[in-house]
Amino acid sequence: MKPVYKMHMKTFVILLLVFGTSQYSHAQTDSLAVVKANWETKKIARGITLKQHWFDHSLFGSNQNISILEIKMRHGIKLDVAAEPKVLKPASEFGSAENAVAAINGTFFNMKNGGSEDYIRLDGQALNETHIGKNGKRSFHQRSAIVIDGRKVSIQAWDGSEDWESKLKGEDVMVTGPLLLDDENRVLLDSISFNTARHPRTALAIKGNKVLLITVDGRNDRAAGMSLYELASVLKWLKADDGINLDGGGSTTMWVNGMEDGGVVNHPSDNKKMMKSPDYKPGMDLDRLAADTTRWDHGGERKVANVIVVRKR
């Protein structure tokens, strides 16, 4: 029995080494694809640059389309949270109303009744409280926050206390999540489908004195979308220090003032071909329609409850 046992163990070790080497090889290839990508760049304003790249089956074995607004937090540039307590409107409308340079969609919200599901503070005043579930536990997107204090932007993790949000120091606060990177380290994510499935994604990352606003397109043949594991990897390869996930799916939108197509620079996934079809019925779950029903354009913005805006003063 001993020789057989040894042979099995040897085979197991070989398979483990082969599998591990293969996984490492894929990760190395993907990281190089991000680091060496020939990003299309456009200067939006002093200290603000838009970077975009379409990965043709070259990232995570799939098509991916990423837009990054890179912001140097210098004098004259500031981030703010903009939100409505009940009314829903597109990110572009929020941005225009705020005379902003740019905007991305914010945290999770009630699509039927409006208002954020998570804590929002504007100019020192709480606008929305965190809606804790009936089980008394915080959702995965209620355990971290973006805090804006003057020109300083930080990402904070839940400390376990009940009224954690109200104690955060900053004029603007947006609870969202989950947290993806903490001090350059990946944060352990649950294996729930929200984290493991591929969807359009929106994220904010901090890299030294820069803030990165990021959208990942999805639900289209030209863009698969990412799992949060994949998104965390991208943030890591971009050399971010901290990173956090925001609301994604059909909400994912990046708007830049003065750009074509009304300023929307990514490809929102709510512009569905089936909405023009006799097969479409009001109330259908648009998030679950097949990828080939999504138009690859800049239309189809979903109305949201809150955004993060970039101001130039």
Image: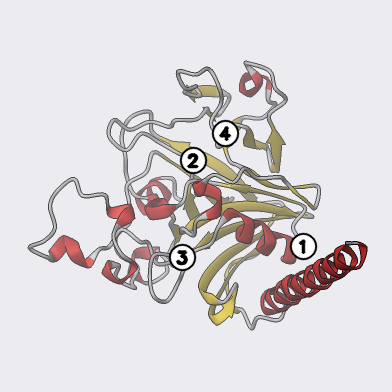
- Residue at x 70% of width, y 22% of height: 160
**SS at circle 1:** loop
Indicate whether 162 appears above or below 198.
above
Q: Residues within 10 Å of mark 3 (few under 14, many from 20)?
A: many
* Drawn side of residue 59 relative to residue 193, left or right: right
Residue indicated by mark 3: 217
Task: Say which of 102 and 249 sits in front.
Answer: 249
Q: Residues within 10 Å of mark 4 (few under 14, many from 20)?
A: many
Task: Say which of 100 and 282 sits in front.
Answer: 282
Task: Say which of 193 and 159 sits in front.
Answer: 193
**SS at circle 3:** loop
Check disc 1 and give the amino acid type: Lys
Q: Earlier in the sequence, mark 4 or mark 1?
A: 4
Q: Earlier in the sequence, mark 2 or mark 1?
A: 2
> Where, by quadrant of the figure, is residue 229 drawn?
bottom right
Residue 157 percent across, percent down from the top left: 70, 34
Task: Say which of 110 and 125 sits in front.
Answer: 110
Q: Are marks 2 and 4 in contact (CB under 8 Å)?
A: yes
- Residue at x 56% of width, y 22% of height: 137
Tell me the distance, in whole angstroms, between the alpha carbons under discs 2 and 4: 7 Å
Residue indicated by mark 2: 107
Residue indicated by mark 4: 175
Check disc 4 and give the amino acid type: Val
